[in-house]
Amino acid sequence: MKREASKYLLLIGLAAVAGCAEEKPNTFKFVGELPPDFGYVAVAHYEPEPGEKCEVTDWRRSFNRHWPKEYEPTSIIEIRKTIKDCRMIVKRIKIRIMATYGSAFYHEAEDRANVGIYTELDEKYRRVMNAEDGDTFYGECQWRFRTMGPDRVIAKLLRCKKDNERGELYVGSPFGAYLVDQLPGKTIRMNIRLSEKEHPSGGDTWVEFPSGWKRCLGKGVEDMYGFCRGNTTDFIDFKMPDGRICSIYPNCGE
């Protein structure tokens, strides 16, 4: 009798262990693989699960909002949450790709990326988990430069896009689309590379030479717009973010 009871308890224990083993995690990891002096700020947006009627219609959680003072490249994202007795599910992650180009607090720029999460999504739009532990979507960022103010100080903008050369389809900001059932226990990586070549942010203000870009003089020294208008022989100096006075960008001198 004792032997039968022991066997029965053992079977119950094994069943419980198997049940725990089959339970899927309620989180996934989001990892930013970014160039030096880059980071990301992310906001996970939650909505009520399909069929739920809730007072709460939108809930958000932020990650790395104190960048660059505090930064963690790996964020743990909860898939489902209960907020005020409402069962909610993550629907999207809005990402700001951040970068610095100098030492001053205003020497930074940003662009966007996104992760879309769906309960239903046509197979041709959703990504395939190519790695055993998850997936990586790819982007490329480029610095766009211009001058500002009467001292013609260099300021930069950041432009990021899907990296078609590394297999991403279509145009637009870096983006990954997933079914919610693909995510438990997985790692989603956003891999961003920086273009080696910078480019002016506006047209007809710089002329490119083998050694770099020269700033057009425009109508004269006081012309802050400095459109070339066909004059590709008269140029003007400008100030780099570190205070150097230069005649060609980005190498400063010829």
Image: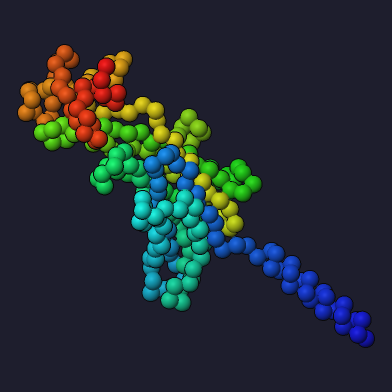
Where in the figure is residue 36, as x and y percent of width and height?
A: 42, 39
Please name whichever residue, 143 or 202, is drawn nearer the observer in this view of the structure: 143
Q: Is residue 206 left or right of residue 181?
A: left
Where in the figure is residue 71, as x and y percent of width and height?
A: 42, 53
Relative to residue 163, is residue 216 depicted above or below? above
Where in the figure is residue 41, as x and y percent of width and height?
A: 38, 52
Q: How is the image coloured?
A: rainbow
Q: Is residue 195 left or right of residue 199?
A: right
Report the number of discs: 0
Please name whichever residue, 131 or 40, is drawn nearer the observer in this view of the structure: 40
Q: Is residue 174 left or right of residue 159?
A: right
Q: Is residue 172 left or right of residue 117?
A: left
Q: Considering the image in quadrants, where does the N terminus appear?
A: bottom right
Please name whichever residue, 221 or 25, is drawn nearer the observer in this view of the structure: 221
Residue located 29% across and 20% down the image:
212
Residue located 50% across and 49% down the image:
31
Where in the figure is residue 125, as x and y percent of width and height?
A: 50, 44
Q: Is there any visible trace of residue 88 in the rendered image?
A: yes
Outermost residue, top direction? 233
Outermost residue, bottom direction? 1
Residue located 11% across and 23% down the image:
218
Rendered image quadrant of residue 127: top right
Relative to residue 100, is residue 84 depicted above or below? below
Residue located 26% across and 28% down the image:
200
Relative to residue 16, is residue 202 depicted above or below? above
Q: Is there any visible trace of residue 122 in the rendered image?
A: no
Q: Considering the image in quadrants, where does the C terminus appear?
A: top left
